[in-house]
Image (cartoon, rainbow, N blue to C red):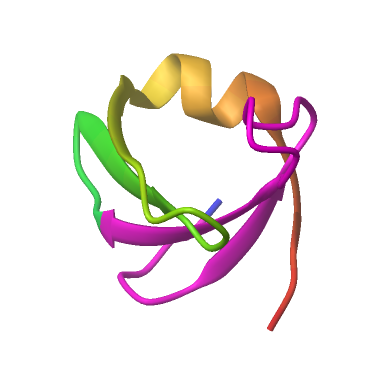
């Protein structure tokens, strides 16, 4: 699956703030994601990202 910087994705589990939409800031072996509601940024491994990915929103 092809992911690019700037895409908005929906994850299976919601962030503690209640939002499950994330913006991709970095791709590679790790993904840097930014919550679209509160702005919190996380860094997760590609395998975990692909497991929890639900769909593209834009």
Q: Quadrant of residue 44?
A: top left
Could you tell me residue 9's position as x and y percent? 63, 59
Residue plotted at (38% across, 56% down):
39
Q: Against 48, is 12 above or below?
A: below
Could you tell me residue 43's position as x and y percent? 25, 29
Outermost residue on the bottom side: it is 58
Q: Nearer the viewer, residue 2 or 25?
A: 25
Q: Against 40, is 30 above or below?
A: above
Give the side of residue 10 with respect to residue 16, left or right: right
Could you tell me residue 52's position as x and y percent? 67, 25
Give the side of residue 39 with respect to residue 32, left or right: right
Residue plotted at (75% across, 39% down):
18
Residue plotted at (36% across, 69% down):
4
Q: Against 26, is 54 above or below?
A: above
Report the predominant secondary structure element of the magenta stretch.
Answer: loop
Give the side of residue 35 with respect to residue 51, left or right: left
Tell me the quadrant of the picture where the C terminus can be found.
bottom right
Q: Against 7, is 52 above or below?
A: above
Q: Nearer the viewer, residue 35 or 4?
A: 35
Could you tell me residue 21's position as x and y percent? 66, 55
Residue plotted at (50% across, 28% down):
49
> Does the magenta run of residues contain 10?
yes
Total labels drawn: 0
Q: Nearer the viewer, residue 40 or 26?
A: 40
* Residues in magenta, as a range: 2-25
Q: Quadrant of residue 24?
A: bottom left
């Amino acid at each position: 699956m092809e992911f690019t910087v700037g895409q908005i994705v929906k994850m299976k589990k919601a962030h503690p703030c209640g939002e499950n939409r994330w913006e991709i800031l970095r791709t590679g072996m790790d993904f840097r994601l930014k919550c679209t509601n509160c702005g919190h940024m996380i860094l997760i491994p590609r395998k975990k990202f692909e497991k929890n990915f639900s769909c593209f929103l834009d």
